[in-house]
Image: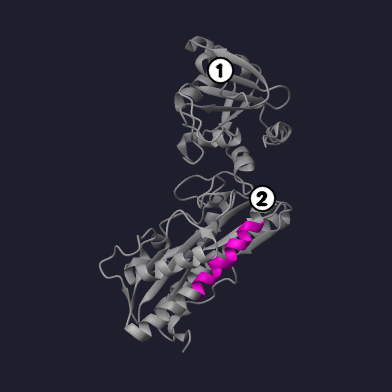
Amino acid sequence: MFDLAKIQNAITEFGFDGWLLYDFRGSNPLAGRVLKFPEGSMGSRRCLYFIPKSGEPTKIVHRIEAGALQHLPGRTVIYLPWQELEAAIRDCVAGCQKIAMEFSPGGGNPYVSRVDGGTVDMVRSFGPEVLSSGDLIQLFEATWDQEQWDMHLEAAVHTNSSFDMAWKFIAEQVRENGGVEEVAVRDRIMEHFAANKLTTYHPPIVGRGPHSGMPHYETGDGGDTLIREGDFVLIDQWAKCDRPRSVYSDLTRTGFVGTSVPEEYTKIFNIVAAARDAGIAIVRESFAQGTPLYGKDVDDAVRAVIVEAGYGEYFGHRTGHSIGQEVHGNGANMDNLETREERRVLPGTAFSIEPGIYLPEFGVRSEINVFVDWEGAVQVTGGELQREVVPILAYGS
């Protein structure tokens, strides 16, 4: 449901005079979600929706698509020539000092940057300062409700249990057949998801040895994909309930095909686990103290542990991502490496914390999910935190 009063309260809370949502041929899917565009709709002309911090919104639509925003409240201004379009925008922002748009200063955050620079320049030319709507977007696009939280917990039960199932399967196949293909383990996890009514946009990652050191390895594409005794194994999997509006659970764990784990793997795992725990700690501390927390802060805290241990160059991706109806959601990412993530971590949002150290011989990643509830309580989901590399051949022995 489109809640105008809630949006206007948020505009005021974040210090804006208004929010100008712009779309051209589906160029701004974030605006489409906030404005509840009907599924499958896509106009061929520019349309805008201006929400002032108080008062009536304005719909700006082309003459041949005059009904494009008819499902939304507010007055309608119809334009034909570009001069009328610009005049309508000028009238909307007249007297405003700060306008929110899907824009990121300096292109620092491409997840938010959905409005072209020329349109931003035009709006600026009418007087207001254009600022990022990033926090507004995640408030209305990335926050979960109780039903979604419940579905996440349900999915997390089965993503968590899939690891035990996978380790046991590897152990059985290695004992009986001398090894098992990565793809076979992946397929067994997918069967587990299907049996428990979970769905996913892509099968999990199962990587042995050097493949575990490739963060986005495509399972089965390596030169040697048979998992044998003595191999290190990484499994990264994500799934959600096969129901409307469900949200993902996304977890990564590691194991060693043996009854005990060599020190070389334990050493790297312990560094990664300490970094993961530093991320959880800063989130909990910030919300307990009521201090603002930004995605970049979490990344900095996690990365500092790995850098101090001397492995900074082997941690080549952001610390975590927003989680929603897509596994990579539209809220704040835990990132100060790939992008300048200056959005706040907001109550009602979820994200991963997944540091890694990727060496040529093997790679370790430990991924957990964090949900900050509506009262600011920090919940870690997906079962007990992994505290050691799993000795896979200890299963059933």
> What span is colored magenta in the figure?
150-164
Q: Is residue 155 magenta?
A: yes
Which disc, if any, is residue 267? none
- Residue 48: x and y in percent read 56, 23
C-beta proximity under 8 Å, tags 1 and 2? no
Q: Residues within 10 Å of mark 2 (few under 14, many from 20)?
A: many
Relative height, residue 163 to residue 94 (above, below): below
Going by the numbered disc 1, the residue's amino acid type is Ala
Residue 271 seen in the figure? yes
Which residue occupies 42% across, 81% down? 171
Q: Nearer the viewer, mark 1 or mark 2?
A: 1
Q: Residues within 10 Å of mark 1 (few under 14, many from 20)?
A: some
Disc 2 target residue: 348
Relative height, residue 235 to residue 16 (above, below): below
Which residue occupies 50% across, 25% down? 120
C-alpha separation, residue under disc 1 versus residue under disc 2: 36 Å
Residue 281 seen in the figure? no
Going by the numbered disc 2, the residue's amino acid type is Gly
Q: Is residue 305 magenta?
A: no
- Residue 347: x and y in percent read 68, 50
Which disc, if any, is residue 66? 1
- Residue 205: x and y in percent read 41, 63
| Magenta span dominant secondary structure | helix
